[in-house]
Amino acid sequence: MTYTIIAIVVLVVVVLFVLISRRSSGGAEPTAAEKPTSLPKAQPKPARPAAPEQQPAEVPKEAVSAARASAAKQAAAPAPEPEPEPPPPPRDLSVLRKGLAKARGDGGFLGRLANLFAGRKELDPAIADQVEEIRLTSDVGVATTQAILGRLRDGLGKNELQSSQAVWDALRADAKRILGIGGGKVAVSHKPEVIFMVGVNGVGKTTTIGKLASKFKSDGRSVLLAAGDTFRAAAVQQLEVWGKRIGCDVVKGKEGADPGAVIFDAIQKAKQTGVDVVLADTAGRLQTKTPLMDELKKIARTMQKAMDGAPHETLLVLDATNGQNAVSQAKMFQEAIPLTGIVLTKLDGTAKGGVILGITDELKIPVRYVGLGERADDLREFNADEFVEALFGASAEETAAA
């Protein structure tokens, strides 16, 4: 028992001695497991040897000389001429010629001239007196007929026109000169393009607007119709029928409303919705009625307020069957408001198609469209060369036989 106690005491003393020794020496040395493993330093990669510089292959002198000679030959050779464009296909004038058949007939100015010259191998100045008789009843217009026949009489007096073919060619050239001031379809150059339609009662104005709308739609343009004829309920209904048929909106007001206000609203709507074309209808009016003509001026001023520069086109619709009266109408409307074009309707139903020469010659207003029937496709864009060719034909004999 005594030895056991002594042994325990000795053991405690030894342990204390060991702990005191470690603390005085700064702690025990870490074991091998506790020591951190040091990473080996990365060895630099050996540099790749530089590739030996390649020397360009030597080109034979003969090849260089041949290449230079070929380049010089190509430079000296003339540039190839562009291939000529194929000629345009012949125009189909059958529909237009058919529509002008009555104007080429015996009752028209040209038909009577054709009958006068047909079959004559030679002409003398005395025939000018017979031509003068035709002038008195001409549908072309007094001033224009007088100018045309005056030039014809001079040519006969100087023996420059010695055959019926020569006379016919001279008349055809005169007609091309008169109609060559321009014309054709309305060019859409504004957004919206505002087109103001005017004319007397019964000329087919509202129908013409519907046909024009159909043509613009077929060209990919959006259209808005303005029912400015607020005095005739049938005109508004007619426009609504066209609108449903071709798919465009109609802006209208109450019966008897201010037409200028209706058209103003239509232009504003077109601007807001991005519509391409506005076709503005107006009530038909006699050219001799001053208050009604003054109303057109007021409507035009209102359109200007709605859009700067509007209306961009003012088209006068004329009935070809009115003959010389159509020339008088054009003069009166031109005095009231500036006209930019003519639409001549019902050419297929009259022998007075020559009136187009009088209007263009006296007023210097281009023709935009001509109407040759009831269908929308029967409103044709005016082309002076085609019109003259269809109206005059190839010769006096051909026209007389038509």
Image: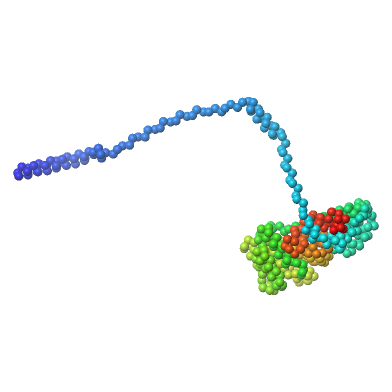
x and y percent of residue 260 in the render? 69, 69
Residue at the limit of the structure toward the top, as seen here: 61
Compared with residue 7, is residue 159 higher up or lower down, i.e. above or below?
below
Residue at the limit of the structure toward the front, as seen here: 401
Residue 291 seen: yes
- Residue 243 appears in which quarter of the rendering? bottom right
Please name the residue shown 15% across and 40% down the image. 18
Along the line of sight, the residue nearer the viewer: 190 or 78:
78
Q: Is 216 positioned to the left or the right of 59 in the image?
A: right
- Residue 99 appears in which quarter of the rendering? bottom right
Residue 297 seen: no
x and y percent of residue 284 in the render? 75, 69
Q: Is 252 positioned to the left or the right of 369 in the image?
A: left
Q: Could you tell me how many numbered marks the image carries?
A: 0
Quadrant position of the N terminus in the picture? top left
Compared with residue 218, is residue 2 higher up or lower down, i.e. above or below?
above
Quadrant position of the C terminus in the picture? bottom right
Please name the residue shown 84% across and 60% down the image. 104
x and y percent of residue 113 in the render? 88, 59
Colour scheme of the picture: rainbow
Along the line of sight, the residue nearer the viewer: 25 or 384:
384
x and y percent of residue 350 in the render? 82, 64
Along the line of sight, the residue nearer the viewer: 112 or 382:
112
Q: Is 130 positioned to the left or the right of 243 in the image?
A: right
Please name the residue shown 91% across and 53% down the image. 163
Please name the residue shown 72% across and 42% down the image. 82
